[in-house]
C-alpha cells in the first residue's frame, strides 16, 4: 500500500516548520550521540566502503553532520572521491570535489574543485526535513534533489513496479535517466514518519539511515535489513 497522500502546499509547509524546529531543538548531547551512530552505521556498510564516488552534503539548518564519516572515508586505503552539491535556483544540482570552499553566511558553503557528472555518482547521501517509512522525502521545498534525480521520483518508481508486476521480470536497476547510484536518506529518527504529503515528482530513496539503524522501503529491491 502506498503512503502517497494529497500534497497540500500548506500542509507541507507546516510539516517543514514543525520538523525543522524539532530538529534544531535537539540537545548537543542528543545530536552528538545520534550523529556518531549514523556515521558508524554508514561507515560499516560495504556499499559505502566500496563506492568510488560518493555524493555528499554539507550539513545546514540542523541536518545530520556527516563530517566524521567524510574524515573516516578519506582515511581509507583507497579513499572514494567525495562530491558536494552546488545549489542554483531552478536548476539541477551540480557536484564538485571540494579542493576549497566558498563560505557564505547563512547559506550552504560552495565546493570549489573538479566537477563530477551525475552519472559518475555511485552512492548519494541525501538529507531531508522528513522521510516516510516508504522512503518518500520532504525537502526544503526548492526541488533540487527531485530535479537532479528524476528517476527516483515516486511516479517513476511506481511505473517500474507495475512493469515488474505485468512482465514478472526482476527490477531493472540500471533503467535510470541520470544516474545508477544507490541513494540513502540521512536523518534523525524524529524525522522518520509513517506518511508524508507527496507529489508524483518527489523522490523515493533506496533506504533511510537514522541513529536507530536502517529503514528499507518496499521499492522493488532489498538493500539492507532494518536494525
Image (cartoon, rainbow, N blue to C red):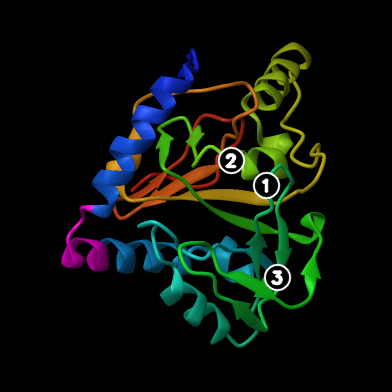
Q: Secondary structure at mark 2?
A: loop
Magenta span: 25-33
Question: Is the C-beta separation of discs 2 and 1 under 8 Å?
Answer: yes
Residue 180: horizontal and vertical position, in percent? 75, 48
Q: Measuring 81% from the left and 36% from the top, which residue is drawn there?
A: 175
**Along the line of sight, which residue is nearer the eye, 29 or 142?**
142
Q: Measuring 62% from the left and 55% from the top, which residue is drawn there?
A: 124
35 relative to 200 in the view: left or right? left
Q: Earlier in the sequence, mark 3 or mark 2?
A: 3
**Along the line of sight, which residue is nearer the eye, 73 or 16?**
16
- Between label 3 and label 2, give the one nearer the viewer: 2
Question: Is the C-beta separation of discs 3 and 2 under 8 Å?
Answer: no
Q: Which mark is residue 142?
A: 2
Reply above or below: 172 against 104.
above
Please name the residue that numbered disc 3 is placed on.
52
Q: CA distance from mark 3 to mark 1?
A: 29 Å
Q: Which mark is residue 89?
A: 1
Q: Which mark is residue 134?
A: none
Mark 1 burial class by Cα count in 10 Å: few <14, some 14-19, many 20+:
few
Residue 4 among magenta residues: no
Amino acid at each position: 500500500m502506498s503512503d502517497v497522500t494529497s500534497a497540500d502546499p500548506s500542509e507541507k509547509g507546516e510539516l517543514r516548520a514543525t520538523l525543522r524546529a524539532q530538529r534544531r531543538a535537539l540537545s548537543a548531547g542528543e545530536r552528538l550521540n545520534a550523529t556518531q551512530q549514523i556515521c558508524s552505521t554508514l561507515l560499516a556498510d560495504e556499499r559505502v566502503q566500496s563506492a568510488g564516488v560518493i555524493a555528499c552534503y554539507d550539513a545546514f539548518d540542523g541536518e545530520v553532520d556527516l563530517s566524521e564519516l567524510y574524515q573516516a572515508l578519506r582515511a581509507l586505503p583507497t579513499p572514494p572521491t567525495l562530491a558536494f552539491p552546488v545549489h542554483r535556483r531552478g536548476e539541477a544540482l551540480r557536484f564538485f570535489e571540494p579542493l576549497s570552499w566558498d563560505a557564505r553566511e547563512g547559506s550552504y558553503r560552495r565546493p570549489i574543485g573538479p566537477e563530477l557528472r551525475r552519472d559518475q555518482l555511485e552512492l548519494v547521501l541525501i538529507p531531508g526535513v522528513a522521510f516516510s517509512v516508504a522512503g518518500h522525502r520532504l525537502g526544503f521545498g526548492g526541488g533540487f534533489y527531485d530535479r537532479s534525480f528524476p528517476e527516483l521520483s515516486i511516479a517513476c518508481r511506481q511505473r517500474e513496479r507495475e512493469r515488474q508486476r505485468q512482465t514478472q521480470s526482476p527490477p531493472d536497476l540500471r533503467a535510470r535517466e541520470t544516474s545508477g547510484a544507490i541513494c540513502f536518506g540521512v536523518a534523525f529518527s524524529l524525522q522518520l514518519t509513517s506518511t508524508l504529503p507527496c507529489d508524483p515528482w518527489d523522490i523515493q530513496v533506496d533506504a533511510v539511515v537514522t541513529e536507530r539503524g536502517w529503514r528499507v522501503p518496499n521499492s522493488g529491491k532489498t538493500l539492507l535489513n532494518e536494525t
